[in-house]
Image (spheres, grey):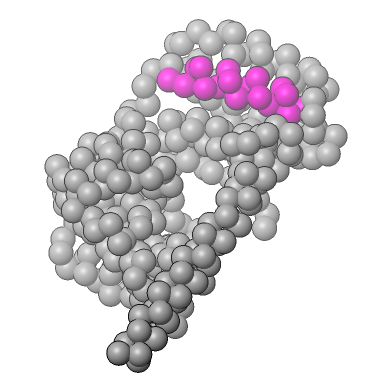
Amino acid sequence: MIKTLKLLIRKSLEKYYLRKIFMLEAYHFFKLLVKYNASINTDRDIAKMQYTLLRENHTIEKGLSMRNPRKGFGQKKVLNLLIRLDKYVTLYYNKDKEFVDYLLSTIHYYITYTKQTGVDISDIELKFNTLLNRLDNHTYKNIVSGIKPETKEHILSECNKNFESLLYSRHSLRYFENTLLTKEVLEKALSLAQQTPSACNRQGWKTHIFQGENSHKLIEWQGGCHGFEDQVNTSILVTTDLRAFLFYEVHQAYVDGGLYAMNLINALHSLGIGTIPLSVAFGYDKLDNLSQFDIPRNEIPIVIIGAGYILDNFNVAVSSRKKY
């Protein structure tokens, strides 16, 4: 009787201790979020402002890289980007002048492209030129931005040449052939990605493959693919099983899952398959709706990988990178 009572007390204390640790971990992360998350006091911090400007800039390149960009798309977004860029010049231009090069180049590309389609965007052009005058006609045209043409022949010739060529030849594609990926190519990619390192070799990642209409529904749920939802006929939701990790490894699921997802993207690319990673960094209320796709609650979503066979000719966003 005494031994049973002691065992119950010990288990109760262990549970109390673990709950206390979880609460402390959650509180510590909460404090980091409140201080450093880009949604809070965004323009009071140069790094936060730069990250969010890059995010807004990419939406323009993304629109340009669609199969059939909507005529005159993105005008409101470009105007808002110019307003924020003007504010950046006021606050931080003297601290980091080179940062504006990529954004100015993208907006210039957008203006040139949109005018060629016959759309009047004189208000955007005026605001852009006014900003340039503020910068003394800052030189930015040596920066490549916008979109560039690519071919299937080039991708297939480069993706398996060496590791460097594998990385430099991969792009995020927003349209593919209409043919579904075969079971064989998917299994080969999954087998290659299985070589991903993980904490203590636990391999806690999971994959959920959707094709056809089911893929379209998942992409529509994701919500960031307006204009090309129906182009993604195969999508892979990468998750990580929370049961693989202990109380002091609360973020390891995202680390292991992220490593696996990148390896899966590269594995697909090495097989000549086009991909686009799609974020699932959403709030808990939206993530709860993943249950409609039969995703267990013990699995946290890492990324959706849209995949498909590459067309002979297509456009990709330049997505200029920092040096390192």
Is residue 159 rendered magenta in the image? no
Q: Quadrant of the C terminus?
A: bottom right
Q: Residue at coordinates 35% horizontally, 58% vertically from top-left?
A: 300
Which one is in front, 211 or 173?
211
Which one is in front, 317 or 311?
317
> The magenta stretch spans which residues?
73-89
The answer to whether one can see residue 196 in this image is no
Q: Residue at coordinates 44% horizontally, 56% vertically from top-left?
A: 170
**113, above or below 122, in the image:** below
Q: Position of residue 110 (x, y in %)?
A: 53, 25
- Where is residue 123, by image quadrant? top right
Which one is in front, 14 or 178?
14
Is residue 77 rendered magenta in the image? yes
Q: Position of residue 252 (x, y in %)?
A: 48, 68
Q: Position of residue 291 (x, y in %)?
A: 22, 49
- Where is residue 6, by image quadrant? bottom left
Q: Position of residue 272 (x, y in %)?
A: 31, 60
Which one is in front, 163 or 222?
222
Q: Residue at coordinates 25% horizontally, 71% vertically from top-left?
A: 188
